[in-house]
Amino acid sequence: MASPLRTGLFGEIVAMALATLREQKMRSGLTVLGIVIGIMSIVGSTSLIRGLDQSLRESIESMGADTILMVKFGAVSMGSGRELTELLRRPNLTPDDADAIEEQTDSLASVTIVLGQGGNPTRARVYYQSERTKQISVFGSTANYAEVFQADIVEGRFFTPGETRRRAPVVLLGQTPYLALFPNIDPIGKQVRLGDTRYTVIGVVGPTPSPGGFNMGQDDFVIIPHTSYQKQFGIRAQRMFGGEMRAVMIAAVPRADVDREVALADIEQVMRIRHRLRLDEENDFELMTQDAILALWDQISGATFLSLVVISSIALMVGGIGVMAIMTISVTERTREIGTRRAIGAKRKEILWQFLLEASFLTAVGGVIGILLGSGIGVGVHYATGFPISLPWWSFALGLGFSASVGIVFGLFPAIKASTLDPIEALRYE
């Protein structure tokens, strides 16, 4: 338990630190500038990264835990370090692949194909009378698209298998074209133009989940039957780096009584046979699940957060060196004061604590300012762009802890120097 003298000494030290801060505003500001920048960077980057992390996680989870996606290659393959030229040489997926998977497996409840999404996405404007949209994505799919991707049809209906077979000119609007073309009108039955072809609007897809309200263009699309898509656009191919990329994706959902791993194995078997792969050859396609995508995002977000912490720590170290330099100068300037305090009975450890707490107090003030500025940056970015943010309490505690630790570590040398001054020599100092 602290004695009255110790309590009084602590209060005196805090009062002296406040007086120093008031009397030497310029020096104090320069002393804590690096701390402010470092803590501001940590808090600001943490708020943005965690906000994006939560938003993307919820978006990925919304696709369904059992949904299986198959593409020529995707983020998981690229994240594993494979060469892009090698991935581009893989065979393209086709609508026939989706038909074969559906016909040759018993473990799947539903299979769909999505054209126009992925490597070379199809984009176009949609026109209605004198109104038009910006460039948005055009997807071609099957009648069970909504079932596989858990899409919410808020108006009208989805197209039927018969309309798909007949290449019917029907379209479903995402929220962006719906609001742009029909803000106060019932769109069902209206004729819109997509490129040079007219389509009848039969439905509207509800808003895609977007935690935090951040608009990443997730509602900028229309959906037409994949047969109508092929008739108008073909299956677009883009040549790059000696390979060819088509915007084709296949998605499947296992039956309720079938384990996802069994469904994955069935799809893999069908595709390996179709691509004539030997037993010792790797898959030349990529199967993705929610777990795999989340694991990849964990690696990316973890590495990004670590790099930002390292960069911010450099600013904190520079600020700490500044604290040590300024406090060392302060010790030199206050040599006679130290000698006087020693002469009237102050112990070495009291002098040590005086300068150590003064340095910690200054850096803690810098930490508080950095927290406020970092939070302000996060909130400002959120209101300006809608970017999702998260301000967890531990990021504030981390900022205060870092700033106080910098004061203790870098204030230790000048504090020891002050406490070891000889009282007689200190009183003689000019």
Image (tube, rainbow, N blue to C red):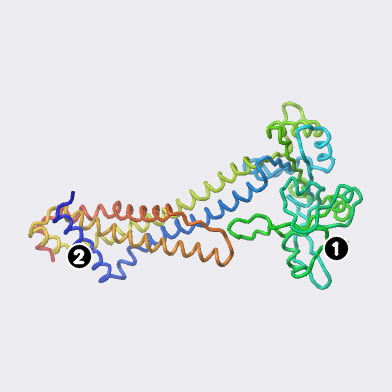
Outermost residue toward the right in this view: 166
Residue 317 drawn at (x, y percent) = 37, 54
Q: Residue at x 79, y 50 (%)?
A: 115
Q: Residue at horizontal 74%, vertical 26%?
A: 279
Q: Is residue 426 visible?
A: no
Residues packed near mark 2 inside 10 Å, few (<14), some (14 to 19) or many (20 plus): few
Q: Nearer the viewer, residue 370 or 107?
A: 107
What amino acid is labelled 1 in the image?
Answer: Gly
Residue 331 drawn at (x, y percent): 21, 60
Q: Which percent across, then down, holds residue 80?
A: 62, 40
Q: Nearer the viewer, residue 79 or 190?
A: 190
Q: Residue furthest top?
A: 279
As displayed, is residue 280 above or below residue 197? above
- Which residue is label 1 attached to? 189
Q: Is residue 401 left or right of residue 211?
A: left
Find numbered disc 1 in the image and state the secondary structure of the residue it sits on. Answer: loop
Q: CA distance from mark 2 to mark 1?
A: 85 Å
Q: Which residue is mark 2?
A: 333
Identify whether 254 is placed above or below 328: above
The label shown at residue 274 is none
Disc number lying in front (2 or 1): 1
Tell me if residue 198 can be seen: yes
Front position in the image: 411 or 297: 297
Left or right: 289 in relation to 358: right
Given the image, on which type of amino acid does mark 2 rest?
A: Glu
Residue 129 located left or right of residue 83? right
Q: Residues within 10 Å of mark 1 (few under 14, many from 20)?
A: few
Disc 2 on helix, strand or loop? helix
Q: Position of residue 332 (x, y in %)?
A: 20, 62
Q: Quadrant of residue 64?
A: top right
Quadrant including the C terminus = bottom left
**Mark 2 or mark 1, which has the lower sequence index?**
1
